[in-house]
Image (tube, coloured by chain):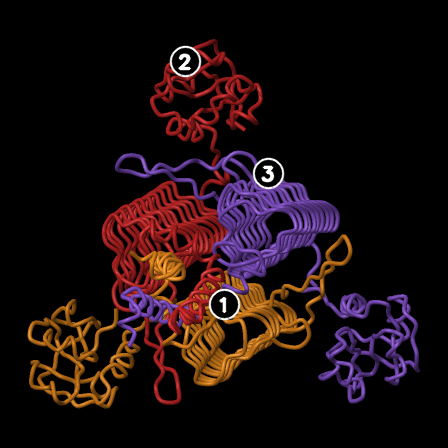
Chain colours: A red, B orange, C purple
Amino acid sequence: MPEFQLRFIAQELGLVLQGDDVSIRGMNTLEEAGPHELSFLANPKYTPQLAETKAAAVILTPKHAGKVRRALISANPYHDFARALALFTRREGTFAGVSPLAFVHPEALLGDGCTLYPFAYVGARAILGAGCTLYPGVYVGEDCRLGDGCTLYPNVTLMSAVELGRECVLHAGAVLGTDGFGFTRMGDGIQKIPQNGFVRLGDRVEIGANSAVDRGALGPTCIGDDSKLDNLIQVGHNVRLGKRNLIVAQVGIAGSSSSGDDVTIAGQAAVSGHLRIGARAVIGPRAGVPHDVPEDFKGGGTPLMDGQTFLRVLALTPKLPDLHKTVKKLEQDVDKLKSGPASQE
Amino acid sequence: MPEFQLRFIAQELGLVLQGDDVSIRGMNTLEEAGPHELSFLANPKYTPQLAETKAAAVILTPKHAGKVRRALISANPYHDFARALALFTRREGTFAGVSPLAFVHPEALLGDGCTLYPFAYVGARAILGAGCTLYPGVYVGEDCRLGDGCTLYPNVTLMSAVELGRECVLHAGAVLGTDGFGFTRMGDGIQKIPQNGFVRLGDRVEIGANSAVDRGALGPTCIGDDSKLDNLIQVGHNVRLGKRNLIVAQVGIAGSSSSGDDVTIAGQAAVSGHLRIGARAVIGPRAGVPHDVPEDFKGGGTPLMDGQTFLRVLALTPKLPDLHKTVKKLEQDVDKLKSGPASQE
Amino acid sequence: MPEFQLRFIAQELGLVLQGDDVSIRGMNTLEEAGPHELSFLANPKYTPQLAETKAAAVILTPKHAGKVRRALISANPYHDFARALALFTRREGTFAGVSPLAFVHPEALLGDGCTLYPFAYVGARAILGAGCTLYPGVYVGEDCRLGDGCTLYPNVTLMSAVELGRECVLHAGAVLGTDGFGFTRMGDGIQKIPQNGFVRLGDRVEIGANSAVDRGALGPTCIGDDSKLDNLIQVGHNVRLGKRNLIVAQVGIAGSSSSGDDVTIAGQAAVSGHLRIGARAVIGPRAGVPHDVPEDFKGGGTPLMDGQTFLRVLALTPKLPDLHKTVKKLEQDVDKLKSGPASQE
């Protein structure tokens, strides 16, 4: 693990150091930090922990600065915590250069400073930008194009003609550019609709472990700049996601649907095919999205409901048996009432 | 990309060409086709686009033939569109032969014309039919048997004793033949039930990226001829799927369940264990199937409902809060009524 | 397939053999067993099959011993069936030693008797215990530590600093230690929260095919001794699972949630982040868990309900349209009643 002086960290982050210098070996929460770890206070509910933390120093706002022995004064402690974390992040591996155990087709082109681990494969006419890293078991198909600084972790598969922008990160086992699910029942058989399109990712897109992004049937499946997808996600053919989408694990997005910029979709949600999710929409966990979603929508459930309705439906669902009982009782009462006042005695 | 004369395409598909010849470089929708692309009209709602399309030619029925400069006359334009697409589909890769960087166990048998990319592995006593293609990172375990013309895309795993019929296609990252989930709680511990069975696929079965098909506990897990499974699907031990099943992404099918021929299961649905889905049933997206399903059933939801009931339940779910309000109001009204007409004044 | 004398099997399992000896080539159900297969009777409903089975011998309780020609007498036939199965289980592969086609970093340490298949990769400073097996396409990142007797099936990825206890089994395509999904929206952009933690598995943990276990943001993601996870499961960063958890396929567990010992979670369920599932809880299939769950809880549904409520809600859900009709009718009746007895004529 790297080790830094606190003064150096303050300089790197552009923060004021209050207190004396000390060597820092890592970062941790207030509760778990040791005497050589840097911590942070972002959520006010943890303020009482300042009195007891063993952290060497804490990133916090000016108003809490007096409560700890050493402070890095920050206008946005969570943001600066993330920036400090980056100082302590190490690369996954230290291998450098092109391994003689990698396979690079003679017609492929590698940019300057690419790292190819053993057992990486680069097909004919693939073009890699400068500083790309391919871990073991990576397959880059023919005619793929990778922008500068892309990282493909172990066992990532890019089928032919996939295009990546700059600095994309594909986590282990992710598969891009496989055939979309195009079949039609024809009489007594099934006909495959050939999938002749491709996949195009913008800059700084991140795809999680074991996720799958299908190639278009015709033309591309697209994911916009800075969008981040978690693990085990399915993106169907000809989907077009906007910029800065955040898609949580195990979501499925069916073919030809699209999203605007800054959309968030929580875990295990499902989006039907051929629909449009407006910019900045937030779709809750497990939601089933059967139709277009307006911009700035926030909601969840199946079918998709606005947030308030959804929460009330969730709260009322376990009361369904009581509701049935109440209605049955009402029916009996009304029957009595209908048969006249005489029978009520 | 390949390029064909339109006249050649007409001959290949057995269609009448109306208009002059032109070179065709690809296919596209009416809206997006360029002057060297072939398009098609299958859905009548796009008929108005015939007037404005830039497509070089359009596959369409005789009744629309007069509306475009060049037509391929077809009784079933969507079908012929798919057939034409196949002309423009290129193979994923152009590698041929058995790479010296592949590993083939001396006791394995490869049929004529097999292609093994670098870093493919074939275990002892595995038998591959003629014309099989194994991409990089493919693992074929001991005693596997592959029919002629199977394609295993990168990083596919076939655990030992998996059997594939002819012309199966396994997309990147698919895993066949791993242990089923067989454990029982025994006193204070957990006992593993050894999974001694295997996996058997029929002819022309297709399995999507990162899907998993478990081996049987005893005997096989089977998938019938021409069945097509999408990405990220889980098929449990001893499942038996019929012929021509279409299973969409992220479906889970629990152990020992079976299906008849021509079943369709939409995305993210879940099928419980030890049940039977009748032939031609269509199960909707996200459905939860807790019991046997009759032949020709169509429906969805959790629990599984017939299509009409399901759609009404879906429509009424967001109205649950209103229903509760109405019932509360009715209770008050009935209470008043019960206390007698006098109190109503 | 191995072949054993029935007398030998009886000795191995410590069971009394009733009847003569015979050679046994495998195991099967009463219905499907052939004349050289061993079967078992665990579920009383199959007792009638004893009369007709072709099995060479049957594992059963003393009370049924007289009904078959050859019996292995057992106090717990299902348990002894599982033990007998283990005799017939063969290893996935027979390769032994360290393949010259594997890559082992000079600073890595391999324990005695490790097997490394071709195309396995072990990074710098990784330490493998004795008797570990790495199949083709396995990636063991830098600074990983594996206990004795671990098995990593093909195309498994361990990112750097993953720790495995003894005798862990990771099925094909499983990915451990990839970045957790840590991103925050900052003004117009997205900031990545670096994921600096790691993954730690206890002893005898099993992880299914194509499952993903994220590294902690800070500190570890932990899975306790003897826990078994099925295929296609997502485990988020800083999750802590207890001992002997059984987690069925396609479950998702969001970041920082934890479970006690002996918890069971059925297929496709979802657990939200930062919550606690008590020991011995049983969570049903497809359940959505939005809050803490007490010890010994049994239930299902979304939101999570106790078992009885859940079953009633399930049963009443398809009756929602009828309920609406009934309430509408009640409203009309009450309106009539409110307008006075006169109007009822």
Q: Position of residue B281 (x, y in %)?
A: 44, 81
Please report, as a chain letter, where disc 1 is located: B
Q: Identify the subunit bearing mark 2.
A: A
Image height check: is C54 above or below C132? below
Which secondary structure lies at badge 3?
loop
Q: Amino acid at mark 3?
A: Asp
Disc number for residue A17:
2
Real-space Cα distance between discs 3 and 1?
A: 39 Å
Mark 2–mark 1 distance (CA, rounded to whole Å):
55 Å
Point out residue A194 in the picture as x, y percentages from the top left corner.
32, 74
**Residue at the spot of label 3:** C143
Q: Are marks 2 and 1 in contact (CB under 8 Å)?
A: no
Residue A16 horizontal/vertical position (percent): 37, 14
Q: On the rendered structure, is A255 left or right of A5?
A: left
* Mark 3–mark 1 CB contact (< 8 Å): no
Which residue is painted at 33% across and 22% down in the image? A75
Left or right: C211, with A128 as reference point: right
Q: Determine crowd level at label 2: few under 14, some 14-19, many 20+ residues with C-alpha closer than 10 A.
A: many
**Residue placed under numbered mark 1 in the picture:** B270
Q: Is residue C307 left or right of residue B313?
A: right
Could you tell me which secondary element the residue under label 1 belongs to? Answer: strand
Specify the amino acid type for callout 2. Leu
Which amino acid type corresponds to the residue marked 1 in the rendered image? Ala
Residue C96 in the image, given as x and y percentages of width and height: 71, 58
Query: Depth check: C20 or C156 in front?
Result: C20
Q: Is residue A344 above or below residue C163?
A: below
Q: Is residue C279 visible?
A: yes
In the image, is residue A270 above or below residue A128? below
